[in-house]
Amino acid sequence: MDFLGLFRNRNKGSKSAAKERLQLVLVHDRAGVSPEFLEMLKGEIMQVISKYIEIEQEEFDIQLTRTKSDDGERTVPALVANIPFNKMKPNTIRAKEDETE
Amino acid sequence: MGEVIVITSGKGGVGKTTTTANIGAGLAMESKSVVLIDADIGLRNLDVVMGLENRIVYDIVDVVEGRCRIKQALIKDKRYPGLFIIPASQTRDKNSVSPEQMANLTAELRKEFDYVLIDCPAGIEQGFKNAIAGADKAFVVTTPEVSAVRDADRIIGLLEANGLKDPKLIINRIRPQMVKKGDMMNIDDILDILAISLLGVVPDDENIIISTNKGDPAVADDHSKAGQAYRNIVARTMGHKVPIMEMDEPGFIDRLKRLFGVKVG
């Protein structure tokens, strides 16, 4: 048995976990955005971007957070996407050029 | 003209009815005239918490459907002369009353009483809409648990969307020892998340169970910590400034020190 771990847990307390989880879930509740909706959005955004860019699909992450509004007076929900990519797809650039000709 | 206050929470089982009973009895102890309305139609409970279950003749549905006058449905409390309740119907459901009917009822009652307190059912459906219809103030009850705080947040949003601005928070069943250990969210944590003003904090107290068993609100019990907390909430409801009471019970070592005359910080 992990006695040390037992003590560590006790020292930290579980309330910070409660608070963090609550804050996260409330961001979604308040904006009326469900995790399913976010998944759907993520899928569609991924499709659009993949047309032009080779993205690392495993690393693609989209989250709802809170941020200050432009006037700095209110907190508003914000979508934050993290989309690491390898490179542009060469054929798409050419395709664009073809279109303009 | 009296005030109409709805006591609500979203989640069930956090202590709305107990809170309603204690604030109501506390206001009556201060010589106010008070009527408590049980809006939880189908799950009547305020009457048993108040120990008045044997006196019911008419209920709220009888009143709104015109089978009796308001006066006939008012059940007089056995302890305080200014305190009355209007019980919920036990055999009907939430749709037996409309928001307009509730608004009319509370408008009539506020002419006669200093305070009209509405014990709201759990949930956000018809029963909630009925309960808030005639209210001009709202008290939100929560406990220091993730589920209760989440539901409180939802209720606060719905109250504000329905024109009930600036609802006040009551944190119920806080356990100082667990807060001290960091295993329970403290007052600041909850206020930080919900961002509304605090009306009071009620410690978890076995006396509440005992007093509910007897049908005697704990607010009258001088030995109950929760009773003291309710008396403070009552004073704040009447507009007095009362500091949030000290929750920390002296630990074993502190008591030992006190026993031997050592000053405790």
Image (spheres, rainbow, N blue to C red):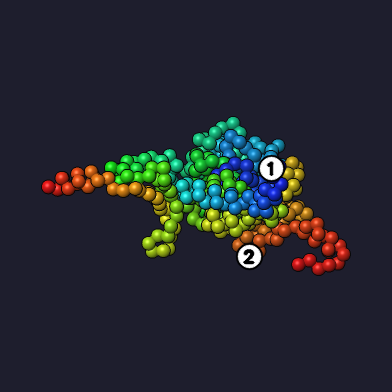
Secondary element at image label 2:
loop
Q: Which class describes the residues within 10 Å of circle 1: few (<14), some (14-19), or many (20+)?
A: many
Q: Is residue B239 visible?
A: yes
* Residue for badge 2: B241
Q: Quadrant of the C terminus of chain B?
A: bottom right
Query: Looking at the picture, which amino acid does disc 1 mark?
Result: Val
Q: Position of residue B81 (x, y in %)?
A: 70, 51
Specify which label sits upstream in the sequence, 2 or 1.
1
Q: Position of residue B118 (x, y in %)?
A: 58, 47
Q: In screen coordinates, is B155 left or right of B222? A: left
Say if A71 sits above or below A10 in the image. below
* Residue for badge 1: B49
Residue for point 62% across, 37% down: B44
Q: Quadrant of the N terminus of chain B?
A: bottom right
Residue for point 43% across, 48% down: A63
Secondary element at image label 1:
helix
Mark pair 2, 1: CA separation = 28 Å
Q: Chain of mark 2?
A: B
